[in-house]
Each structure stands twice: as C-alpha cells, then as structure tokens.
Amino acid sequence: MKGNKEKARIAVGLSGGVDSSVAAAILLEEGHDIIGLTMEIFDGSSSAPLGTKGHACYGPGERHDVERARALCRDLGIPFFALDLKEEYKRYVLDYFRKEYLSGRTPNPCIVCNRRLKFDFLLQRAKEAGIQLDFFATGHYAQLEKREDGVLLKKAVDSSKDQTYFLWALDREQLSRALFPLGTMTKEEVKEKARSLGLETADMPESQDFVEGGDYSPLFRENEIRPGDIVDKKGRVLGRHQGIIHYTIGQRRGLGISSQRPLYVTAIDAANNRILVGGKEEVFSPGLIASQLNLPTLEELREPLRVVAKIRLQHRGADARVFPLPGGSVRVVFEEPQMSVTPGQSVVFYIEDVVLGGGIIDRALV
C-alpha cells in the first residue's frame, strides 16, 4: 500500500519470524491501523516429540513462536490475537498430508495451509471474534498489482526469495484483500530493517521444515510406515525401504543400494508398498497432467497457452505449452524434458513475472 495515504485496518499474519515482523512494522509506519494475528495449530497429538526450538510450521515449539509474536505486538503497541485453528489444521492440512503420502504422492502442505487456513479460516475466526478488517498482510515475498478488473499476483523483486509458488491457489477474493509488504525488498533489506527497529527477530535462523526436525514419522500411525522392497523396472529386488513416506520422485540419497550407476526413485507403488528405482534418464518427463486448477488471472483456459511452468519451489521453471482437457484438467508439454515431475506437487504457470495460477500434478507423461 506504499503511496496510499488512506488509512486502513490491516491484520498481519505473524509467525514469530523476521519477515512477518517487518511486514507489520512497515504497515504501522505507513500509518495504518494494525493488529497481529497468529494461528494456534499444534494440538500435541503427534506420537513422538518433534523438538522444541520452533521455526517450523508444526510442533511444540509453536508456543515460542506465539510468544515472540505477542512480544512484537507489545513492542509495536498493537493488539495481538492468537486464534485456535487446531481442528481445521488437522482436517485440512494434516489429514490431507497423511493421505497423500500414504497413496504414494508428495504433497505440499504450505499451499493448502495458505489457501484454507491463513487466508480463509483465520480471517473467518477473526470476524467471529468481532475483528473487522480491510486487508490481510503476510511476510511472503510476492507482489500484487491491483487493477480495475482484478488483482495480479506477481513475483517478488528478490527472485531468490520469491514465494509465489506457495500462493498460486489463492482465489480472486483472497488476493483482493491481500497485502505483501516485502515484495519489493531483498532478504538482506528486510533483516536490516528489523535491526534498525531493534526487533528480536532480526537475526533469527530460518527454517523451511514443515515439522520440527524435518521427520514426518510422528504424523503417522506406526502400522502405516511399513518396510518394503526397492525394485527396478523389471521387478528385481535391489534393497529394502523403510516406509514409502520417506521417499519422493527423483530422490537419490538414502536409498541404501549398492550399484555401479547412480539410482533414483522413479515411482512409488503404494498399492504394493514398493519403491521403484532406475537411472537418471528414467526420471525425465516430457510433460504432465494436472488438475484442481486455480487460474484467477484467466478464470478459464479455453485454448493452448505458452507459459513458464514451475514444478517445485527450487525449479527454475521450464518453457511449456498448457492444453485444456475435458473435466477441467490440463496437459502441460515442456519444450525440453524435465526431471522429477512429482505427483502431488504443484505446477505453477507464469508469463514473465505474472502468476497465471496453477494446479496439482496428477502424473508425469511418458
């Protein structure tokens, strides 16, 4: 909202980290009426301890993150609310995460959490508590271009920190009320801003773990994680795996197989509890099929479109054509085959720095 002199009532989603802290501070400096909102999502039901350091989405360290957010709001002189979304998180994020992994897919819980929890249930719960808002801001590195016909989601200036891959599922209504104050800043500029304000979060270490420690095992029941065979495409047993939840397409390390050539996970056969492996050439695909589309920029894909398709967060993106299919799915054909097209992950479509939308990968083309 830089340059907009009109005062607005804005809730900032606080995680206890430096990015959301600086987002709140910037909007406060611009003269807006700011409140801090934090989700409480950890219900203590995991079957094993997940650590206590915080800095992850889910785990007992949440209490430290909540207290940091509370302290920040106290220092900034703004109201703070921690809202209980444990049941919603379990239903829409954890249950989804478990179901996908147990079916041999690799989900991205951050995308579901943004769409259903942060930009939906959190704001519903705030409204139920009598908190009236004009906008909802987060510390994501992304930009918005507001136009008469809607809002465009665009890449952040700092391409190394761009987080639009996590935001493709937000619909038009959610984007119309969103603010991303850090979109024009680099990570170092954000840290410098935090230091200049004396924020405790200025030099906090970053973590991108979904659960504390990065081990998903505590989220599953013991009988759901079963050892099984690692086989090649001819069905020959090459080794044993420790549960399909520990593997993903394209994985090379941690297979525990002695081989004269590097082996990669090429498929996960959940029905038979097997991991399939092969050479590097076997993990390249000419394209993919995706569904569960969200295309807020286009509303609907009626004809083939040239895009840059990004199939995971660290993927540079590949030139591709997107073809509409009956039933609302799309076929994506890459100009050059891409490595590790992974069912359950997201494919996000860009034209230059504009996010057209995306979908969930159903399968790789062969």
Image (spheres, grey):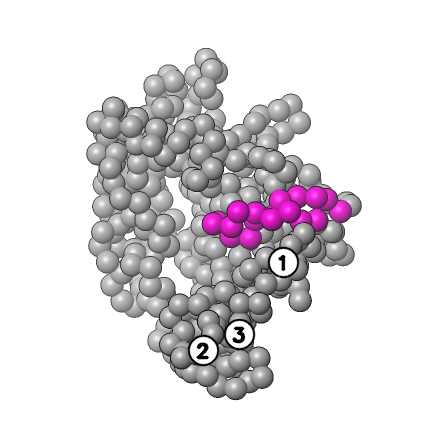
Q: Which residues are magenta?
A: 304-321
Contact between marks 1 and 2 (CB within 8 A): the answer is: no
Q: CA distance from mark 1 to mark 3?
A: 17 Å
Residue 350: x percent and y percent?
61, 41
Closest to the observer, 5 or 341: 341
Q: In the image, is residue 219 part of the stretch drawn in magenta? A: no
Closest to the observer, 5 or 238: 238
**Which circle's residue, 1 or 2, is located before the other in the chain?**
2
Q: Residue at x 46, y 83 (%)?
A: 238
Hey, which quadrant is residue 181 in on the image? top left
Q: CA distance from mark 3 to mark 2?
A: 12 Å
Reading the image, the residue beneath label 2 is 260
Mark 2, secondary structure of its residue: loop
Position of residue 198 in the picture relative to residue 316 (left or right): left
Reading the image, the residue beneath label 3 is 278
Q: CA distance from mark 1 to mark 2?
A: 25 Å
Q: Residue at x 24, y 28 (%)?
A: 195
Q: Residue at x 47, y 31 (%)?
A: 157
Q: Of all residues shown, which one is farthest toward the bottom?
A: 236
Closest to the observer, 334 or 86: 334
From the viewer's perspective, is residue 88 above or below residue 299? below
**Which circle's residue, 3 or 2, is located before the other in the chain?**
2
What's the amino acid at mark 3? Answer: Gly
Reading the image, the residue beneath label 1 is 337
Q: How many marks?
A: 3
Residue 324: x percent and y percent?
74, 51
